[in-house]
Amino acid sequence: MGVHVELLCLAKYPGSVMKQEVKARSWETRLIDCTLGNEVQRILTTASIIETEFLIALPKGGQSCQELLQRAASCYATAAKLAPNDIRAHLGLALIMEELFYADDLYGIKKEEETEMETEAEISANQEEFDAICNLHGVNPVDGIAQQLKAIEAEYHSLKLSGQMFKAEHVQQLHAWKSKQASQVSYGSLNLDMEGTIVRAIQKLKDCVSVNPCDGVSCYNLGRLSLLNEEYDNAAVYLKAALAIMPMFTPACLCLGLVLSFQNCKFAATLLYRGLSEYLATREYDCIANATELSTYKELLSKSFYRPTNSLITEAFLAFAEIGGNDNLVPEACLLHAARCLADARFTYRGATYRKCFWLSLKARSKLLQILVKKKDSMALRHCKELCTLCLNNELPPTNDLRALQIQVCQTGVILQPNSSEALCHLGSAQLAGYEANGDIQLLKEAELNFKASISQEGLDIDPNVVPEELESQVWWRTHKNVQSDTQVDCGTDKMSIPSKNSKGTTASANKHLASQSKAASHLSGQTIPPTKVCKPSGAKTASRPCSGTSIAVTKTSSVPKAVTKSSGTSIPSKAVTKSSSTAAIQPKTVAGKSIQPKTVTKISSTNSIPPKTVTKSSGTSTSSKASPAQAIQTTAVPTISNGNTGNVLQVEGQISSPITNSPPEASPQCKEKNPKSHLSRLGMARALVKQSGVPEHNSKAVTLYHEVIAMVPELHEAYIELGAILSESEPLAAVEVYCSFPFPSLSAFDDAFLHGEVVRILMSAEKYDDIRLCNSLISLGKAMGIGVLEKNVAVLEAKFKTNLLKQVYAGVHGKPQTDPDLQQFFKFKCW
């Protein structure tokens, strides 16, 4: 109740919203349809019918869904024009605008003119041209996107002043292309322009609040969209007002709790738990009712809050885990639910919402990994490998946050397995990517060390106790070891300061048990021994299990050596197995009037300082109570029977059994996993060496590594391209040999065409016109990219009167012999 009282006191509307004038904007005017008539109620009913038709047509997809939403928007815009004070029209239009965004972002339903997608070749060409213009103005990729866009803008103005309008327009298109690409990088807000559908939805929701400030649904939707767009201050105001009007509305509770968690408010945990509990209950009901089938769409996504595709749900789980959760929803469960939201969601199209949910899922998995590592859970290693693969191979645009997460996860993998070649290679790749983005030379040096360590560990057993020398010299590893050592010192101090609670009780109970055992032995007569009654000391456990007609009483006392007493005979109905605090002397037993001295066998352990075990065995003859040193250190392997508890020792068929422990058996050398030989470590090592410019010996090492990569993976284009780029500066013809050594397929792809293009460029620059490799590369390049790409080269060869070469190239590109009539006519026309 206190939560809602304070929220009611804090619920205030901004004055700009209260004074906002409700008027039709330009985009609303374009939606108005005069053929719908003047009856507002009939128009709103028609819009509801169209929404139902949209939900039915949604599983099939297509342009019909987009047209239905446009028709519904026209109905609501017309109703808002006819009745400006009717909140239903404004709210319906706002929700349809939001649904248009989800249709595009989640289902990929776009207008026909927006369906064109850039190919990889176009993206690569635009990026190369963009970088070249930035280099002309002295701007590097490390300087950031803002400085790069300023360089492009400066180039545009310089071209415009010089009168080169065509080139200026092309540069302007590059500026718009890069700006749009940069707006898609963020994982937080929706990053929409002023004409976007979400912005229009917010405008209409503000109209709703202006018309009726006491409408809680309008306040809630306005706060929710403000939260999605990372406008936290406005979102808090609207959501507080919504909860003041509708105190039990759980979606508003969750959204407000998420906003307050960013502000470290004390009410955040209560509100978040209320909303998340409702979400979990809804998901459970959906699973039982089979309501998550692909063919089932019950309401618009703008009206459905509790759905896995809502990124606010995943963010709320993360925020609640960060707060600490509660007894009913612990942080580990919150992180699991946050990671599962992505798996439960249905993303037909991977837009901004998918990227944000994927990013939140990575954050949840990384936090869960840290918890597993801290608890030394056995699943930590497997979870780390899976998360490392997700971080290094995804469709998210590279950002500083993603690179930092990649490095953190890969470092965790190295901590779990320091000499794992795969983990070291992943860490080196992440650090190399971080250097390329930020220019941190420390990351480059550590990446080189990790690649070197990865190569050195190939073929060796993976052992968590083995740490490569290259790893110990890295700053982050030394920091980790210092923190680990400080934690161990603190733990050791805490243990030494706490005295043992059961030390006195254990000794007293052991002495009491030995006294009772001696008393029972003095009254033995005949060959039948009655069951021994064992007193259970404080903190001990007693278990009884019959075996082959034998009554066995087992007494456990923690951290106490064992004493086993056996009386020989043809019939032994009972046995007593006792753990004692020391190897105390056992009183002699009297059987059938004969005095029997116990035989003591001592087993010495070489692995710890536990006192030796005393085993007392009664026989029909008198024996000495002391054993020889040779007998004391003898160890005999005997079968045992265990009742499932640690430390139980049972006697079977007169043989001495060994204690049963829960420690896993040591793995044999044959079972240990070995580090495989990988080309990725060598490729990364070569790239790290090349990045360190100014060191000639590094280039020679890199060349050797590239040759090793080519020998291991002959079909890898990157190795040929990067090795050729190194050799082309000093030995161009050697670079040609590298390019031509690639195993080209019969049908050349884009990457193959690049290799052919480099061969043509180098040989044409060296004027090696008679080289057979030039003819073959020209033919392959023309087949892959078209004859038009050879226009400049053809002009140069014509000037050099290389008509025979030109005939061979044209015939090879068209796949016809030179004697073909059509080609002969073309050759005559070209005077070849």
Image (cartoon, rainbow, N blue to C red):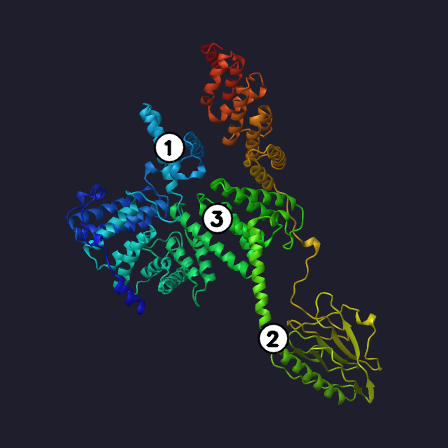
Give the secondary structure at mark 3. helix
At 80% from the left and 87% from the top, the residue drawn is: 591
Report the residue marked by disc 2.
Answer: 500
Q: Quadrant of the N terminus?
A: bottom left
Q: Which of marks 1 and 2 precedes in the sequence?
A: 1
Report the residue marked by disc 1.
Answer: 152
Give the secondary structure at mark 1. helix
Q: Quadrant of residue 744?
A: top right
348 relative position to 8: left or right: right
37 relative position to 293: left or right: left
Identify whether 145 is placed above or below 342: above
CA gap, disc 1 to disc 3?
A: 29 Å
Identify whether 152 is placed above or below 358: above
Report the residue marked by disc 3.
Answer: 404
Q: How many marks?
A: 3
Amino acid type shown at disc 2: Ser
Q: Is disc 2 surrounded by few (<14), some (14 to 19) or many (20+) residues within 10 Å?
A: few
Q: Nearer the viewer, residue 681 or 479?
A: 479
Asked if the residue under mark 2 is in contact with the one under mark 3, i.e. CB atoms within 8 Å, the reply is: no
**Residue 559 point in image, percent of width and height:** 66, 73
